[in-house]
Amino acid sequence: SAVISQKPSRDICQRGTSLTIQCQVDSQVTMMFWYRQQPGQSLTLIATANQGSEATYESGFVIDKFPISRPNLTFSTLTVSNMSPEDSSIYLCSVEEETEAFFGQGTRLTVV
Amino acid sequence: QKEVEQDPGPLSVPEGAIVSLNCTYSNSAFQYFMWYRQYSRKGPELLMYTYSSGNKEDGRFTAQVDKSSKYISLFIRDSQPSDSATYLCAMISPSYGKLTFGQGTILTVHP
C-alpha cells in the first residue's frame, strides 16, 4: 500500500496570501488527486495531477486559484492562491492502486 | 440532489452497541462501493470494499449493498471506543472512474 506524506499538517494564513501544500508518495504513481474536505461536507475532488501534463480540474475549480505542479512520479504540490476565509478547509492528496485510494493525513487550513 | 447522501450524525452509542451507517445514491452507474474510516487529524483509510449486492463481512464489520434500492450500509458489531471516527461511504462508476464520497458520519462510542 502507498504511503503518502503531506505537509504542512496545518496552517493559519492571512487572507490574500497563498499556501503551497506538498505531497510525497513512497512509490511512483501515474495520477495524484487533490481533494478538499470542508466541515460537514463530503470530500470533493479538486483536480487530477498527471506527471508531464497539465492538471485536470473538476467543475468549480480553476487553475488560477489552485495551481498544481507534478514535477515527477512521486511528488505534487497544490497551491491555494489569494486565500479567503471560504478556503478554510482540509486539503488531502490521494493516490489509487487498483480500486483502493490512499490518502495523506491532510492539511488543515484556516484563513483569517 | 446530491449523488450520494449520508446522514452526518453525529452518532453516539455505548460500547458494545451495534452501529448502522447508511448511504443512498442516485446514480445507477455506480458499481463499486467503499467505506472509509477517518480518525481525527488523519486521512481516510479504506475499511470495506464491495462491488455486488449482498453482504460482505470482515470481523466486526459488515458491508451491505442493495443496488435495486440504491442503498448501502455498514454495520459495526460490538462497537469499541476505538471505532470512534468519521465514516465515509464512497462509490465509483467504471465510466466516470472517480470516487464520489458521502459527507461522512461522525461516530462516537463511549465506554
Image: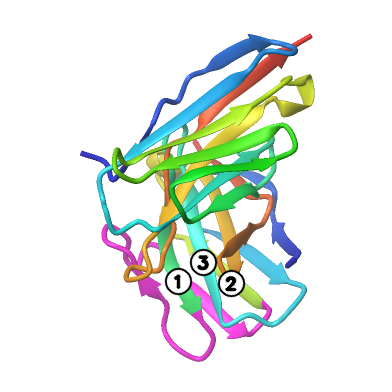
Where the C terminus of chain B falls, by quadrant?
A: top right
**Residue on which disc 2 sits:** A98
Residue at screen point 66% across, 45% down: A10
Secondary structure of the residue carrying tag 3 is: strand
Chief secondary structure of the magenta portion: loop
Where residue B42 sits, quadrant-wise, is top right
**Residue on which disc 3 sits:** A33
| Badges 1 and 2, same chain | yes
Query: Residue A3 at what x, y percent from top left?
Result: 76, 64
Q: Residue furthest left?
A: B1
Give the left or right position of residue B103, taking residue A98 as reference.
left
Residue at screen point 32% across, 71% down: B95
Secondary structure of the residue carrying tag 1 is: strand
**Viewer-side label of 3, 2:** 2
**Viewer-side label of 1, 2:** 2
A16 or A111: nearer the viewer: A111
Q: Is residue A93 above or below residue B38?
A: below
Q: Chain of mark 1?
A: A
Q: Is residue A104 visible to the viewer in this orientation of the structure?
A: yes
**Residue on which disc 1 sits:** A48
Amino acid beneath label 2:
Glu
Q: How is the image coloured?
A: rainbow
Query: Residue B12 at what x, y percent from top left?
Result: 60, 12
- B96 inside magenta stretch: no
Q: Chain of mark 3?
A: A
First reached walking from the N terminus: tag 1 or tag 2: 1
Give the left or right position of residue A12, taking residue B42 as reference.
left
What distance separates the C-alpha of mark 3 from that of mark 2? Answer: 14 Å
- A68 inside magenta stretch: yes
> Marks 1 and 3: in contact by CB < 8 Å?
yes
Q: In this picture, which residue range is highlighted in magenta? A: A50-74
Give the left or right position of residue B98, taking residue A95 as reference.
left
